[in-house]
Amino acid sequence: MTIRSRHETVTFRHPFHIRGIARELPAGAYEVVTDEETIEGLSFEVWRRVATMITVPAEGGRGGMMEMHAIGSVDLADAQAADASVAND
C-alpha cells in the first residue's frame, strides 16, 4: 500500500465554523492536508482518501502556535460553501 499527502491552501473570507472544531475560526488562509492510499489489486492506479486535516491558529492565539485538526472532507466543503454564500449576499 502506498500513501501520499496532498497539501493545499484554502482561503476563507469570513470567520467560519467547521464541524469537529468547537470554536469560530478567523478569516484567512488555512493549510489542508489530505492523506490518500492506493487501492491495490486493480489494473489501474486508484487513490482513496483516508484523512483530511486542517491547520488552525492555537486556541487563545498563543504566540503564533498552530494546531492540526482532523476534519471531514464534506465538512470542509460545507464550510467553504457557507463562506462563499456570505460573500455573495
Image (cartoon, rainbow, N blue to C red):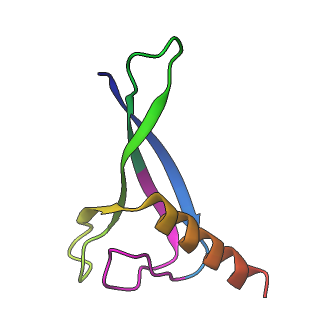
Residue 28 position in % (x across, y down) = 51, 70
Residue 39 drawn above or below residue 80: above
Q: Does the segment drawn in magenta span residue 40? A: no
Could you say where residue 62 lies in the image, as x and y percent from the top left?
20, 76
Query: Which residues fall within the magenta stretch?
Result: 15-32
Residue at figure coordinates x 41%, y 79% from the top left: 25
Q: State the image coordinates of residue 10 (x, y, percent, origin top left).
A: 54, 58
Locate residue 72: give its quadrant: bottom left
Q: Nearer the viewer, residue 75 or 12?
A: 75
Quadrant where the N terminus is found in the figure: top left
Quarter that holds the C terminus: bottom right
Camera-nearest residue between 11 and 70: 70
Label the magenta part by its dominant secondary structure. Answer: loop
Question: 69 above or below 37?
Answer: below
Q: Residue at x 41, y 45 (%)?
A: 34
Q: For the point 69% across and 74% down, which residue is it?
A: 84
Residue 6, position as x, y percentages in the image? 44, 38
Residue sitting at the far top = 43
Q: Is residue 76 left or right of residue 89?
A: left
Residue drawn at (30%, 84%), measured in percent from left and top?
22
Residue in front for this viewpoint, 59 or 3? 3
